[in-house]
Image (spheres, coloured by chain):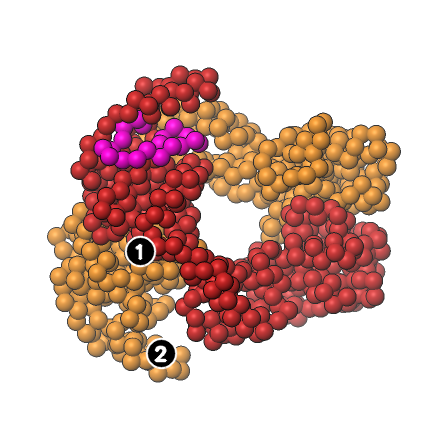
Chain colours: A red, B orange
Amino acid sequence: MNAEIIAVGSELLTPARLDTNSLYLTGQLNDLGVEVVTKTVVGDDLERLAAVIQQAVRRTPIVLVTGGLGPTEDDVTREAASRALGRPLEFRQEICEAIEARFARMGRKMAEINRRQAYVLAGAEVLPNPNGTAPGQWIERDGTAVALLPGPPAELKPMFEAECLPRLRRLVPPLVIRTRFYRVAGMPESDLDQLISPVYRQYTNPVTTILAAPGDIQIHLRARCTTEAEGERLLAEVGSQIEALLGDRIYSRSGEPLEEVTGNLLRRAGATLCVAESCTGGLLAERITSVPGSSEYFLGGFLVYNNRMKSSLLGVDGELIARHGAVSEPVAEAMAAGARGRTGATWAVSLTGVAGPGGGSENKPVGTVVIGLAGPKSARAQTFRFLGSRERVRAMAAQTALDLVRRALSES
Amino acid sequence: MNAEIIAVGSELLTPARLDTNSLYLTGQLNDLGVEVVTKTVVGDDLERLAAVIQQAVRRTPIVLVTGGLGPTEDDVTREAASRALGRPLEFRQEICEAIEARFARMGRKMAEINRRQAYVLAGAEVLPNPNGTAPGQWIERDGTAVALLPGPPAELKPMFEAECLPRLRRLVPPLVIRTRFYRVAGMPESDLDQLISPVYRQYTNPVTTILAAPGDIQIHLRARCTTEAEGERLLAEVGSQIEALLGDRIYSRSGEPLEEVTGNLLRRAGATLCVAESCTGGLLAERITSVPGSSEYFLGGFLVYNNRMKSSLLGVDGELIARHGAVSEPVAEAMAAGARGRTGATWAVSLTGVAGPGGGSENKPVGTVVIGLAGPKSARAQTFRFLGSRERVRAMAAQTALDLVRRALSES
């Protein structure tokens, strides 16, 4: 079954704003087995909106209209839908009273202008709005449904879930959705796709979607079936092949970010972690501490943004820096060992590198990053070369450092 | 003058993707004085796309279609436009040869399927595509223009700028755009709007747009005039009133982020900065070091994620922590002083607080953050209460700390 989404509001036609409600609605509709076939954004223009609604209703059985239900002259959705569907607007005293009561609860008097929100298309079901003044409307005839919904997400989402989902389930044949959500570190997207596309291309169900961020790839599998067991069987069939190909590069099977997975490993091992960051300037620690409860395993660490700080805060020998350069494996190793010694953490991870755009040399071009890791048994360091902007190099470096800690914990 | 944008591609109708090309195109069109009045996203569906193009051309003088110009069966834009505009498709040998030559340059042979890309609507101007195989098309009649453009941004943008802008300038009366871009810290959006809306609401030109992030508000003024001088006069008229109302809460008049403004003040003063972060866990340093060249004024610092680290790394007296608690002004002050002493920086800023979701108490609820600042003359600390999620509390805390450093540097 097909649906169209129409978003109303001139602010959605500016260079800085997109209609993101449609992403939420598309996800909800897809979960019912409904495909979105057209999305339209229209300004606060009565004639144009009426024409768009009319065209949508003629060609598509489910039409969701968001926005334009406010109290001002700019809010034209009620009037446009009335024209498009050929149904007059009727004043409903009980809606007006509900809006008045809402204002009264906030200790205010309803403005006269809000009476506009009490008009409803003839024959429409009113969708209550516990989170705002504008009620929604549901107009259904001959298997075609039009919903008028408020634009603010905090009003739209609860209304859609409470009022539209049950009504849509009546219209649409039932469907079960099962999903699996892998996350993979340490692999470029193109390599990953080359490796696993021969598997997932064989299946149209589950649908496989790959989303890539620097150093972090998400693989979503989404099976649509008539029973849960059938969905799980399909996910297992495709998932087991993907898992066999990717091995321990998969760090999560249920979508948690790497900082959470690594944190859970530390907690489980009763271990603690500290950092010594140069080129990432706090980004690694920021990610680690973005997880609530990270103080159980994260002690803190050192930001050493020049050579003097590497020596004075971490005790890295100035001669070592002079001999090998600040961006070198011996220095990264000494940074990690110094941080571990000064904090007493079980593990210490260090980063030193050239984030760019300046500071590169022939031997150590922009993007060169050395990551050190000191643990209960030994300290070691490894050199990486990341491509791209300063932001991307720093993101890749922090991600790779987290992944090295994860791997060390998985091995030990 | 009005325009419509039609984006083609079934992938743009999934829950994870939005048509972002339209933001770029809207900005470009607005700069010409053209308003976007409708945006539509259609899947790879010939009938539906043909109907959408036909409706758009009937009601709007400029119609930009993006995507669907590739070589596969899924790419239906050429055929749909042919039907909608009633113009047959004609094979152009010279386009086919250009595509063959492009493949040859990459040492490959053109696939037979790419011949589809050499079909052009009768009477269309061909828009060369130096960045891909699909040429664009421009169809103009009686002051109405339709452009067929490739979907990949790296192909679309150069083609739009080289081919469409000059053609649109012929159709549209000339216009000059002047902008001003304020950034403000330390004020909630609602307070700011209440203060300055009596000013900017008086003007439809310049248009004022307010964008708010936690602790950071952007105010864009955009004047559209026939001369530069007139544009600057309008910006100065509105801008001077806004500046008078907001005073030193404005930290930038040209859009730089706070970390860059603060960094420039440090550089100009020949001063250095270090941090001692607890609840923000590296976020403040990460922001400071996101600016290229920040090593000129940023030395580094300490991440002290528990009481023991505050004492061992910064020398904060354990008794002080026991007496006042880790989240207190005396401790924040001691953290800043300790960091300053250990690094030799001119300024040290410290953060200690309850980021949540756990860890709050009646006296120190979630969102309580104390920021300390130690400088050449003295050390002081101030307590704040931020609302919202862990992420928001941390973001507000880092922003406020940066703004305190900025203010201290502006005063000194």
Residue A9 appears in the picture as rendered: no
Q: Nearer the viewer, residue B354 or B147?
A: B354
- Location of residue A121 by image quarter: top left
| Mark 2 residue element | helix
Please state the horizontal and vertical placement of residue A142, each as a whole percent of the image: 22, 46
Q: Chain of mark 1?
A: A
Amino acid type at mark 2:
Phe
Left or right: A285, with A151 as reference point: right
| Residue that appears at 50% across and 26% down | B191
Q: Chain of mark 2?
A: B
Q: Quadrant of the C terminus of chain A?
A: bottom right
| Mark 1 residue element | loop
Q: Which residue is mark 2?
A: B103
Write down the region rendered in magenta.
A116-135
Q: Quadrant of the N terminus of chain A?
A: bottom left
Is disc 1 surrounded by few (<14), some (14 to 19) or many (20+) residues within 10 Å? some
